[in-house]
Amino acid sequence: EFASNIDLIDVLPPGLYEAVLTPKGETIDNPDLVTGEWVMRCEARTLDDIRALGCNDLAEERKFATAARVSEINLALYRAFAQPVVRALVPPPLAEAMRRLHPLRLSYEMFGPRNPWMTWVATEAERVRGHRAPVSAENPLVGAQAMVSQSVVEGLDAWRKVVERLSEETFHTIYGNPALQAALGIDPSSQKRPRKAAESKLHEALVGQRIEELAADMTRGGLAEALVRALIWVGMARNVVDERGFAAIRRLREAHPASRQISLADFKARVREQYLMLIVDEEAALKAIPSLLPTATEDRRAAFDALRGVVEASGAPGDALTERLRRVAALFGLGPELVTNRKAS
C-alpha cells in the first residue's frame, strides 16, 4: 500500500508527515477511490511531535558531536596525506577494477546476467515453470521447508540484534569518553547543546531572492495555478492528505483531455510552488486567485465543482473546510450557497 502511493508522497507540499494506514472497511466514503484494502493518509506533523517520541539528551548530543569531530579530523588527515599517495600509486583503470571487485558489489554481479555461467538459469527457470505441480500439504518436505525458513529468519534476527547491540555499546564507550571529548574541544560538563545549524549569508541571500520571485509570480499563470493554490489552502485546514483526494485528481485528469498536457512532474512542481506562495504571503496569494481565473462564469463554476469534489473525496468536510470553501467560492465569483447546498445534500 505504501509503495503504491509513492506518487502521492512525492506530490506532497514540503513538510513533515506521518503515513497512517487504516483498513478500508465498508463504511468509508468513496471506497472506489481506494486501490487496495487499506486507506493511506499523510498527516502533517511538526518537530514537536518528534520530540514527544523521545530525543537525545545532552550527553548523547555530545557523543554525536564527538563522532562528527573525529570524522572531520580523519577526513582532513586523509585528504592531506593519504589521498595524494593513493592517487599517485593507483592508476584509474586499477581503481575501477578494485571497485568492481569489491566483495559487496561482486556478491551481486556474480549471480547477475553479466556472468556467462548464469545464462542457463533463465532457460531452466522457464522449464521449471512449465512443469511445476503443487504438492500435498501433508508432504514432509513442505513442513521441513517451513522449519528451515523459520530457523533462518530467527538466526538472522538474533545476529542482527547482537550486531546492533554491540555497535551501540561500542559507540557509547568510545565517543562517550570524557577525555576524548575534552581533547576534541567538547566540554563534557557543558549544559549547552554542542551542535546547531550553520548560518550562511549566501543561504540567506538565496532565500530572500526566492521569496521575491514567488511574490512576483503570484499573479502569473492561469486556471491550473488557481486551482492548485485554492486546493492547497483549503486542505491546510485539515492537515491531512488522503489517497482518495489524489485519486480524484487522477480521474479529473483522465476525464478532461486538456489537463492531460500537464505531466505528473509538472503538477508536482506547481504544487510546491503554490504552497510556497501561500507560506510567503497567504493573503496576497489568495487575493491574486481571481486574476488567474477565466472570465466565463460557467468555466469558474466547473473549476470550483472539480475542486470541491477533490476535497470531499476524503469524506465530508468539517466546519473549518466548509468555511474555506465558501471563501474560495467568493474568490471564484460564485455564491456561498454552492457550498451550503452541497453539504446539505
Image (cartoon, rainbow, N blue to C red):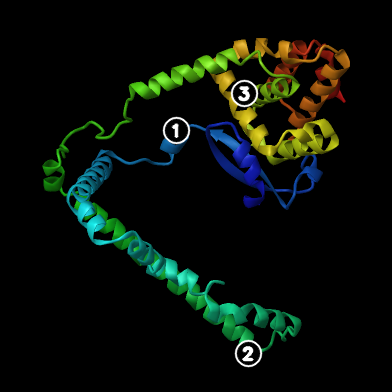
Residue 239 showing in the rendered view:
no
**Amino acid type, mark 2:** Pro
Q: CA distance from mark 2 to mark 1?
A: 54 Å
- Taking the image as shown, residue 143 lies to the left or right of residue 68, namely right
The residue that mark 1 highlights is 47
Q: Is 61 located above or below residue 300 in the figure?
A: below
Where is mark 3, residue-wise?
274
x then y, percent, for residue 261: 76, 34
Image quadrant containing the C terminus: top right
- Disc 2, SS: helix
Residue for point 15% across, 42% down: 184
Residue 111 x/y as whole percent: 52, 74
60 on left or right of 311: left
In the image, what residue type sits under mark 1? Leu
Q: Residues within 10 Å of mark 1 (few under 14, many from 20)?
A: few
Q: Earlier in the sequence, mark 2 or mark 1?
A: 1
- Tell me where residue 321 sits by quadrant: top right
Marks 3 and 2: CB-CB under 8 Å? no
Residue 272 x/y as whole percent: 59, 29
SS at mark 1?
helix
SS at circle 3: helix
